[in-house]
Amino acid sequence: EAGVTQFPSHSVIEKGQTVTLRCDPISGHDNLYWYRRVMGKEIKFLLHFVKESKQDESGMPNNRFLAERTGGTYSTLKVQPAELEDSGVYFCASSQIRGPAGELFFGEGSRLTVL
Amino acid sequence: QQQVKQSPQSLIVQKGGIPIINCAYENTAFDYFPWYQQFPGKGPALLIAIRPDVSEKKEGRFTISFNKSAKQFSLHIMDSQPGDSATYFCAASRGSSGSRLTFGEGTQLTVNP
């Protein structure tokens, strides 16, 4: 069974440019999360989808970040325009609706470097 | 403010040693405490988890100790092996399905041969 896949694995962009990260969750997982880890810090929650609906987006830093999950399958996270402080590793995770609490399955992450 | 504090940031032990990683939380509404293990280039993976109705949980060489009154929990790795070298994250959530995880800052563990 395929795990959570993320693309791209690494993106290097200039400040002010736009980047779109993609996440394909495990098939059948209705919960989809985005997290971010800035160098050496904790993994911070960004937002949570249940199917195609945003359940909790309280962790989104500002309106330069836009997440979508059309059709309740894959999700995209767009950063526009990117700033230096957006650099970090963006993780996507998924879980079953009725799965044990906390049992999230993470992708390998998308490393974003903003120059 | 950081709701889950983890220490140490890094830890080096010899093979066979027992590394201990500590976490403290503030939110008393948390009732599910997982540990995640992350190898370089990979995503975090659930290692072991505990609920506050027990004070200890053991799975293989990994043990969580939980102190509800002190709002602290720790991970012990018995007979550590070089293959255990990874970054370990403690986390906490409210336990219901779909609840967000609040992570600690991570501990980079190195087990020397």
Image (spheres, coloured by chain):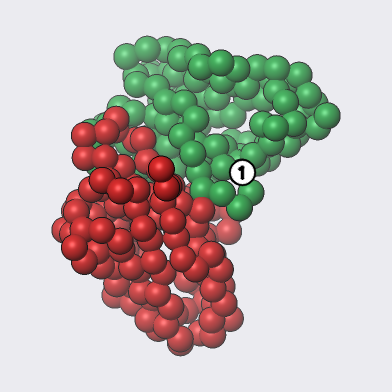
Chain colours: A red, B green
Residue A19 location in percent, x, y? 43, 78
Q: Is residue A12 above or below residue B2?
A: below
Residue B34 lies, with reference to residue A59, above or below; the image says above
Q: Position of residue A33 (x, y in %)?
A: 32, 53
Q: Quadrant of residue B60?
A: top right
How busy is the neighbourhood of tag 1: few (under 14 within 10 Å), some, or many (20 plus)? some
Question: Going by the picture, which residue comes out furthest to the right?
Answer: B113
Instruction: From the image, tell me which residue sits under label 1.
Output: B39
Q: Residue at x 70, y 17 (%)?
A: B79
Which chain does the residue under circle 1 lie in?
Answer: B
Q: Is residue A18 left or right of residue B89?
A: left
Q: Which residue does the image show at 70% across and 23% down from the upper left? A: B80
Disc 1 marks a residue whose amino acid type is: Phe
Q: At which x and y percent is residue A73?
A: 26, 58
Please provide percent x and percent y for residue B39.
61, 43
| Residue A63 visible in image | yes
Q: Residue furthest left?
A: A53
Between residue A32 and residue A57, name the one nearer to us: A32
Q: Which element is circle 1 on?
A: loop
Q: Residue at x 29, y 72 (%)?
A: A66
Relative depth, front residue between B4 and A99: A99
Find residue B27 and report its image quarter: top left
Is A19 left or right of A47, judged from the image as shown?
A: right
Residue occupying image coordinates x 43% and y 18%: B67
